[in-house]
């Protein structure tokens, strides 16, 4: 009996490694799926945290009397965006439908049976649909946050409700469907890996329309139409905001792989993203130094953001050296276009169209120049750029995507904001603008002690 037990024990001991290995093989796909899900969830959190960056950047770049309002509306509008995108926007963007918009997947349940039935464009990844929704919601929220730059310091609070919902329902998801949801630009092979056009150009174009319809802030221009500088009240907040946005971009671009497995391609995308940002900040600071005779901090911050915007389309398609070129060019071009728009009478307090629009256009076109055949094949979208033997084909597709997006968002934004203007009204009264939106819209200042002292001394903040 003892001999038989010893024999059985020996057999089990010999077989155990084989059984364990068999069990490991069976669980490898589940483990891969779990790792991908955690990675995309982390990326979604990073992108949602970018809202904090926008709040700090915009509050620091505007006047003290509006700081609480500018920061606080970030929470309001992201909440509105989440509800509208859950109900309708996600379905229009990623639901199965036609070449222009999705017709399924509304009121997201978070259950995989809905994902199988309604979201064919997202089927390449087995990340749960609830996490995919949160990730894409984060992108929609960023695009809306960009749009608000054009409304800063003079828009009525109800406008944020109305335009925020309509932008999330009838503007942003349509272009997202064109490029990412299986729409007509996707079928042509447009390369916009993480949204230079889909996210940034859309938000910036809406911001431009808002600046035009709202008209300049009181005191921005003299009678001879020369601009006056209206500095932000806290550069430290602006710097901290940009640092948070830079970090958040590591969810924005690398997270768009929707996977942490394989050869670690998300790490390469993080590298190109970071190098572009570094080049954009340095280039913009140097240019501002040459132009103004002083190294301008806000220009450097805008250079970082412009570079990040530009590399967002190209991060998965270009070599590292090209990412540095793309970032540096974005920083320089954004600096000069910001100066031009201001002199042209466009009062864009956060330089939203220069930073996110012009840089978004450049970044989208840059893949048509620098996309390598190896990386294009790896991603499985589009072809080689002009400098890699692809001719003008990919560049033409990129330009078509830019033109189509600009035309659509310009038209829809003018219609939506025009209707709001003649019904509810867009702009606060002159008196409300002078005392500040903190007090006129919310009944208290973001900096109550400082504003009280300023009011007693008759100083405008």
Image (cartoon, rainbow, N blue to C red):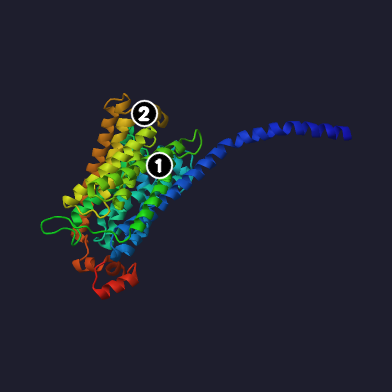
Q: Which mark is residue 372?
A: 2
Q: Callout 1: few (<14), some (14-19), or many (20+) C-alpha neighbours within 10 Å?
A: many
Left or right of 326 on screen, residue 123: right
Count of numbered marks: 2
Is the Cβ of the residue at disc 1 closer than 8 Å to that at disc 2? no
Question: How far from the left and from the top, in percent, is residue 29?
Answer: 56, 36
Nearer the observer: mark 1 or 2; the answer is 1
Q: Is residue 14 in view from this perspective? A: yes
Rendered-image quadrant of the C terminus: bottom left
Query: Residue lying farthest front?
Result: 293
Quadrant of the rendered image containing residue 78: bottom left
Q: Which mark is residue 217?
A: none
Using the image as rendered, state which of residue 97 and residue 349 is in the foreground: 349
Q: Callout 2: few (<14), some (14-19), or many (20+) C-alpha neighbours within 10 Å?
A: many
Using the image as rendered, state which of residue 240 and residue 388 is in the foreground: 240
Question: How far from the left and from the top, in percent, is residue 20?
Answer: 68, 35
Q: Which residue occupies 33% across, 26% down? A: 388
Q: How far apart are the two marked residues, 1 and 2, measured between alpha carbons?
A: 19 Å
Quadrant of the rendered image containing residue 240: bottom left
Q: What element carries label 2?
A: loop
Quadrant of the rendered image containing residue 309: top left
Q: Is mark 1 on a helix, strand or loop?
A: helix
**Mark closest to the chain's N terminus, 1 or 2:** 1
Query: Residue lying farthest left?
Result: 224
Left or right of 62 on screen, residue 258: right
Q: Which residue occupies 27% across, 69% down? A: 440
342 versus 68 height, above or below: above
314 versus 63 height, above or below: above
Question: How far from the left and from the top, in percent, is residue 119?
Answer: 41, 40
Query: Residue lying farthest top?
Result: 389
Q: Mark 1 points at which residue?
A: 274
């Amino acid at each position: 009996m003892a001999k038989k037990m010893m024999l059985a024990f020996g057999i089990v001991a010999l077989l155990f490694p084989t059984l364990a290995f068999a069990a490991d093989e069976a669980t490898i796909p589940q483990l891969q799926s779990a790792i991908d899900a955690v990675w995309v969830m982390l990326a979604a959190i990073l992108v949602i945290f970018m809202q904090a960056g926008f709040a700090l950047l915009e509050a620091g770049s505007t006047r003290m009397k509006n700081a609480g309002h500018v920061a606080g509306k970030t929470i309001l509008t992201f909440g509105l965006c989440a509800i509208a995108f859950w109900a309708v926007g996600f379905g229009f963007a990623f639901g199965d439908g036609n070449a222009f918009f999705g017709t399924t997947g509304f009121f997201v349940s978070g259950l995989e049976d809905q994902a199988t039935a309604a979201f064919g464009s997202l089927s390449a990844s087995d990340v749960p649909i609830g996490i995919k929704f949160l990730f894409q919601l984060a992108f929609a929220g960023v695009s809306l946050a960009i749009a608000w730059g054009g409304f800063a310091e003079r828009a009525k609070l109800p406008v944020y409700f109305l335009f925020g919902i309509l932008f999330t329902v009838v503007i942003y998801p349509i272009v997202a469907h064109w490029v990412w949801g299986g729409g007509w630009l996707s079928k042509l092979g447009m390369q916009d890996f993480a949204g230079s056009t889909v996210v940034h150009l859309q938000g910036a174009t809406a911001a431009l329309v808002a600046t035009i319809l709202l008209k300049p802030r009181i005191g921005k221009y003299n009678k001879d139409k020369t601009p006056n500088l209206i500095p932000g009240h806290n550069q430290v907040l602006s710097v901290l905001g940009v640092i948070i946005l830079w970090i958040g971009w590591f969810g924005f671009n690398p997270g768009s792989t929707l996977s942490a497995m394989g050869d670690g391609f998300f790490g390469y995308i993080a590298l190109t993203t970071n190098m572009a940002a570094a080049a954009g900040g340095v280039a913009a600071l140097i240019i501002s130094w040459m132009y103004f005779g002083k190294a301008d901090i806000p220009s450097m911050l805008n250079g970082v953001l412009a570079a990040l915007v530009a590399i967002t389309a190209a991060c998965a398609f270009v070599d590292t050296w090209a990412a540095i070129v793309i970032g540096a060019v974005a920083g320089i071009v954004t600096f000069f276009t910001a100066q031009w728009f201001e002199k042209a009478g466009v009062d864009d307090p956060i330089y939203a169209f220069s930073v996110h629009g012009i840089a978004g256009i450049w970044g989208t076109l840059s893949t048509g120049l620098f996309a390598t055949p190896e990386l294009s094949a790896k991603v499985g979208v589009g072809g080689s750029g002009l400098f890699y033997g692809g001719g003008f084909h990919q560049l033409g597709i990129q330009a078509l995507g830019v033109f189509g997006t600009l035309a659509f968002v310009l038209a829809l934004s003018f219609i939506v904001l025009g209707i709001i203007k003649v019904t509810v009204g867009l702009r606060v009264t002159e008196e409300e603008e002078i005392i500040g939106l903190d007090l006129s819209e919310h009944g208290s200042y973001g900096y109550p002690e400082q504003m009280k002292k300023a009011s007693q001394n008759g100083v405008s903040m």
